[in-house]
Amino acid sequence: MRMTETYPQTGTGSAPGSADVVLELQALQKSYGAAKILAGVDFQIRRGEFVCVVGPSGSGKTTLLKCMAGLLEPSGGQTVFEGAPVTEPPAKLAVVFQDYSRSLLPWMTVWANVELPMRNKFGKAERPARIESVLEAVGLAGKGSLYPWQMSGGMQQRAAIARGLAYQPDVLLMDEPFAAVDAQTRIELEDLVLRVRAEFDTTVVFVTHDIDEAVYLGDRVIVLSGAPTTVSRNLAVDLPAPRNQVRTKSLPEYARLRAEVFELIQSAKSHATIR
Ligand code: ADP
Ligand code: MG
């Protein structure tokens, strides 16, 4: 099911633990030594939502995502995933990282890379059809026998997305997944992610420093302040679906949201601790 209703900015409408909240950050804090990066981050993700988390470079987006994924222990507060505090990487959560060149195993074909995390969840008989369907969805039909080093950056990132989807996670976390590809590929991959999200009905948390990307993709945009980081705004994005690179970006509401996020980020940068 697609969530289209607006999201309460203050969290009063959707009580913690309500049935459709799949992921909740509660006063999440993280310091590296004496450097406080996350100073208490709170938000909720509801099932079916596509939520973009946007903040300046160095604001702690990767740190936040790793805490959400159970890859990093927070210094305070917690993440609750499907009702249970996250203390290790949850089986029903998948992550797509920025650096595709390090996330795919170079000695395995695309097919084997996609199949690897599926082994714990799907029987041998049901894997091939599912792998074929995700490879087709990301535009890699017939490319399963290639090795990562035989593919362009854009194709490698498609393969990483396919791997995340094949596993059928309840939530897909993506950390600036398109930051390292060229502009044209980036546009294609943005639309690809919107399509496969609709097709596979996945809840997505998409972290980016790119304001346009956040507003274009999100049902909601969570704007982070600069480090020490908190949530500076939780914005419902009321733009019609399906999104379209030309039509959506020429809407007055798109320009208004973009300007609002831009100003919040500028002010976050000017208040952030310089590191
Ligand atoms: P973002 O993803 O928003 O660019 P990061 O979460 O990568 O931000 O980093 C936030 C801040 O924390 C940066 O100042 C970075 O240098 C610092 N940092 C990140 N990881 C570590 C680490 N393992 N040890 C010490 N400092 C770190
Ligand atoms: Mg980062």
Image: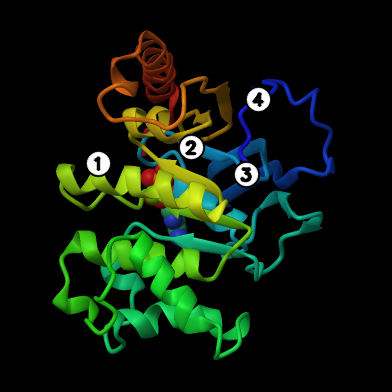
Tell me: 56 left or right of 64.
left
User: Which image quadrant: the C terminus?
Assistant: top left
Which is more toward the observer, 27 or 239?
Answer: 239
Image location of residue 50, percent across then percent down: 53, 40
Type of amino acid under label 4:
Glu
- Distance of mark 2 from mark 1, alpha carbons? 16 Å
| Cβ atoms under marks 1 and 3 closer than 8 Å | no
Residue carrying label 2: 52
- Distance of mark 2 from mark 3, alpha carbons? 13 Å
Above or below, 233 against 252 in this view is below
Type of amino acid under label 2:
Cys
Which is more toward the observer, 111 or 98?
Answer: 111
Mark 2 falls on what kind of element? Answer: strand
Image location of residue 8, percent across then percent down: 70, 22
| Numbered label attached to residue 48 | 3
| Numbered label attached to residue 154 | none
Mark 4 falls on what kind of element? Answer: loop
Above or below, 89 against 49 in this view is below
Residue carrying label 1: 187
Q: Residue at x 55, y 83 (%)?
A: 126
Image location of residue 198, percent across then percent down: 50, 46
Residue carrying label 4: 5
Q: Residue at x 53, y 38 (%)?
A: 51
